[in-house]
Amino acid sequence: MKRSLMVMLVVVVVALSASELARAEVKAFGLAQAQIVVDESRLDNEAYFTLKRCRLFVKGTLDENEKISVFAHLGALKAASPLIDFVMAYDLGGLGKLGIGRFCLPFGLQNLTNPYNLNTINFALPTMYIIGTKHHDIGIRLIGKKEETMGLNWKLAVVNGDETEVFLTDSDDSDKYKDAVGRIGIVPVEGLALGVSGFYSKDVLLPETDLLGVDLKYATDVVYLQCEYMAKKIGDDHAQGMYVEAGYKIGKLEPVARYDVYDDELGWSDTELTVAAFGLNYYASDTAKVQMIGELKDEPADTDNNTFIIQTSVKF
């Protein structure tokens, strides 16, 4: 599967570079993030350095009318394959862009956020445990927007459903069943965005899985407020969680805060987790910033597991 996608990428890159008739336009950009981490849960090595991410993005059009486009997302760290996403899309006009390939599931707000734009460095608990921050799959998707209708926007997809790390299982259903996932949003007033997400999955070994998400974001050039609620149901078991995040810019500085709640009652597990995060972002330029965050964690186990992170981020 991954080998086939790599072949697709090579073919498209060759086509983009060799075809003068297509008048293709190719853009490449990337990001890199390095961290200093102090993690109380690591008994023998609380403080350490890490290169968190190193990503490359390539996008371009395949025809002079810019109807056909391609997007590739590659990562260099801790991955069996460097290819993270690959999508070829066709512009259907008012219906949006229809794409086929491998992509991040269109569920919620934070799940689809570029890592450079994570103002509190880490994903919130509901994003990590309910949908999964690394959940990508192969299928078709439709992305569109109507500015004149309260900013109505949609991201809908049908995927194979065999990459099931989000459901904590290694089973492979050989693509017998497909998963349906999507988010529909509106922008009722300038700066305010509302959305609802849904996910349905059927697996050979697991009961039917349903996910529901509701999100809100208000943002100006100075202040932002973002919150999401997510729920997951697998058979008779369920989990739910929410987070609230806010920030306020003062020149090049931006104090930020986030509070997460996650309640898990999936089978053998019965876990209640909370995280209170407080941080400060310094924007050195439009393409570079330094972030600091402290996370105070409250878990059932009576252990010290708070973390403090300093992260440098650059995009190029």
Image: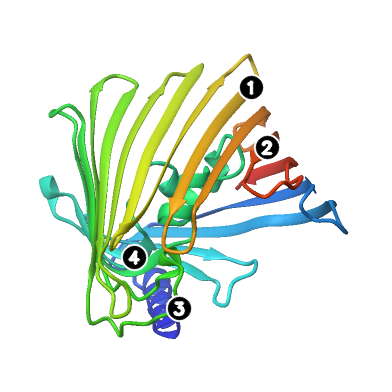
Q: Are marks 1 and 4 in contact (CB under 8 Å)?
A: no
Mark nearest the camera among 4 and 2 is 2
Residue 152 horizontal/vertical position (percent): 18, 35
Looking at the image, is mark 3 or mark 1 earlier in the sequence? 3
Q: Residue at x 59, y 32 (%)?
A: 286
* Circle 3 crowding by C-alpha within 10 Å: few under 14, some 14–19, many from 20: few
Seen in the image, is 290 located left or right of residue 25? right
Residue beneath disc 4:
87
Q: Which badge, 3 or 2, comes first in the chain's sequence?
A: 3
Residue at point 65% right, 44% down? Answer: 314
Q: In x, y percent, where is residue 17?
A: 42, 70
Q: Which mark is residue 255?
A: 1
User: Tag 2, which secondary structure?
Assistant: strand
User: In the figure, residue 235 lies in which quadrant?
Assistant: bottom left
**Dot 2 corresponds to which residue?**
295
Spatial separation of the CA atoms under disc 2 and disc 1: 14 Å
Most foreground residue, 87 or 178: 178
Gap between marks 3 and 2 measured at Cα: 30 Å
Q: Check disc 3 and report the residue beneath it.
A: 170
Quadrant housing residue 149: top left
Work out whether mark 3 precedes mark 4 in sequence or the reverse, and give the earlier one: 4
Q: The disc labelled 3 sits on which kind of residue?
A: Asp
Identify which amino acid the numbered label 1 is placed on. Pro
- Give the spatial CA distance, label 1 vs label 4: 36 Å
Q: Secondary structure at mark 4?
A: strand
